[in-house]
Amino acid sequence: MLTRNSQVVGTAAVTIIGDSPTPTNYAKNQVTILPNIAASIPMSIGTNGVLGITWRNINFVNSATGTAAVVSLRGATNGFYNCQFISAGATAITSTLGTTLIANSYIEGTDKLFSGYLGLYVFGSTIAATASSSTIVYSHGYSTPDQISQTVLDSCSIIQKPGTSNTYVYLAGPNGGTTGPGSQAVFKYTSMASLIAPGGIRALGLDGFYGEYATTGPGSYSFDAKPVDTLMTASMLSNCTVDYVFANSFTGYSTPTTSWVDPIVLQAIADANVIVSASTTSIPLPSSSTLSTSVSTTSSSTTASSVSSLVSSASSTSSATSIRPSSTCVLPASIPSTAHVVGPAGSCAAYMNVTTAIAALPADSTTQYIYILAGTYTEQIPSFSRVGSTIFRGESASPLSQSANVVTIQFSGSVLSIARGSETYAVFRSTQYSAKNYAFYNINFVNIALVTPNMIAIAMDIKAQQVGFYSCGFTSGQGTFLANYGTFFLSGCRIEGSSDFIWGYGVAHITNSQIVSNTPGYSVAAQSYVSTYPSQMIFDQCAFVPKSTTSMGQSTYLGRDYSTSARVAITNSFLGGHIAPAGWLVKTTPSNMTFVEANNAGPGYAPASRITQVQIATDGSAYSLSSILGDTSWIDSSAVVPFSGFLCSEPISILS
């Protein structure tokens, strides 16, 4: 059902509900309000006395490419739930004094998505600015008398709309330049894509304030080299709560109560703030990119066929209400109901990030489970040192396929190799050698720091005994996977990096996995043999392949002499054409070096050209799983990916 533009002029409270088969998902809305003439506004509230208008499951769409808004607001206690606001031009939502709540909705426009005299609280919503050099919040205070324009984005996602490539999107700026009074905007627990402009904001006007608290993603404060806005502390949050915003809005429009807000949404706001605050306020605020942060998740949905193409192109997050009773989660049979479930706002999960779930684990020897719902979680996991068995499992419809993974934990952290201290920048770091029986299933660990020569950026730093990785992914540049002291088994995994991206001192048996080089001219493995601990690396039935065949040449080495002692064997594996004929790189005088190749294949397997330190064997049985690891009873055989050909993202014929 489609209707044309509307103007609300009455003063009585009213609720307008659009038809929807799934009321908690705005992507399923079947009612759209469009302008009846070009450059007009689909919906406007034009009377000061309008109170308590509630809109549910309505799409507001303006296809004009000028500056006409999608919605123009005035009056107090306006509420929008599970709505979409989509503008082909600048200005999505504008306000000329008043108070407004927007929850679980989608807002899209080219520029100035929220503008005017704003008393606005946005929760659990997705924001997409589609033009370069645009501004999300463009607000103005009121000078007679002097009053502040307040905007809070809480637990939102600022995304790059699929199909766009715009950059330099500013979080906020004052309407009126630096002379504009009272423009204030706070972004808390909000994820930000990389399209956010350096500095974050444009400028500060008179009485202006722009702040971030526990924001996440590559566009957030902790990843900004020269932020302009303020990194807020927990003590500063009292002035940006939902009740404070509405109680301290413009004269004549403020309301001392939040009873007009949907109670389910109000509880979700309270839950989200409590849950995330628990994990962030106890962590020292960063001077660099070491902030442990909360979850950011995005997904795409297709709207009802009756909605215009502007609506159907929208990307959305899960817009279910944010009540999280973990007992209602549908868990795999292998995961007990006592598992600590992690997921985005609106899911059944009890925790919004992995950090808080880990913090809730008992410090004992019991077996504990963390189950992670689909999403991308931007956070650095604090040093993990639990003694008891701990199982981390990502949601997956295809548990034996790493390429089907839908759970990613990412963080940006790197340091010059000569500066040392790279472990403190890892996405995940384990520090308890005496721990046993950690297991990871269907999780991708990505260090999103730029791939830069001599900069170590670790995705996984694992120290423990009897650790299994099943269909997991690890991506970075130098130093991707650090097999620290311990015993490790990997099956069906994908490890990508540039230089020495599988390295360390422990014993690792990597089977039926992709070993992907993303930069030419470096070596894959850098093992440092330690005689007092189990210490060697075995690659069996693995595919050593380039991420791209462009400019890779025959420039990649299988391994190098990380120290004067090393133990590395590659058996029954496919070696792509990017592997150098010499195979291995040795720069020092080795005293205890063992490089072995047995029964390999592919254009990169050139035994006659190998350096003298390499042993070419016809039988690799000495490097079988039991021979290397001894006791294998701890390995989950049900999660071991059966070998049915080399795991490659491209056909072997192309990679060769």
Image (spheres, rainbow, N blue to C red):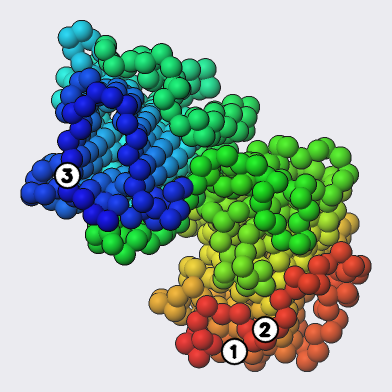
Residue 223 appearing in the image: no
- Give the camera-side residue of 443 and 253: 253
Q: Estimate how packed mark 3 is, as few (under 14), some (14 to 19) or many (20 or more) residues with alpha carbons within 10 Å.
A: many
Q: Label 3 vs label 2: CA separation?
A: 65 Å
CB under 8 Å between discs 1 and 3: no
CB under 8 Å between discs 2 and 1: yes
Does 564 sit above or below residue 221?
A: below
Residue 242: x and y, percent?
Answer: 44, 24
Residue 238: x and y, percent?
Answer: 48, 17
Residue at mark 3: 5
Q: What residue appears at the point 54 percent right and 31 percent down from the top-left corner? A: 267
CB under 8 Å between discs 3 and 2: no
SS class of the residue under badge 1? loop
Disc with the residue nearer the chain's start (3 vs 2): 3
* Residue type pointed to by label 2: Ser
Q: In front of the other: label 3 or label 2?
A: 3
* Residue type pointed to by label 1: Gly
Does 634 sit above or below residue 269?
A: below
Q: Estimate how packed mark 2 is, as few (under 14), some (14 to 19) or many (20 or more) residues with alpha carbons within 10 Å.
A: many
* Quadrant (top left, top right, bottom left, bottom right) of the N terminus: bottom left
Q: What residue appears at the point 53 percent right and 70 percent down from the top-left corner? A: 517
* Residue type pointed to by label 3: Asn
Disc with the residue nearer the chain's start (2 vs 1): 2
Residue 430: x and y, percent?
Answer: 73, 48
Residue at mark 2: 573
Residue at mark 1: 602
Residue 11 appearing in the image: yes
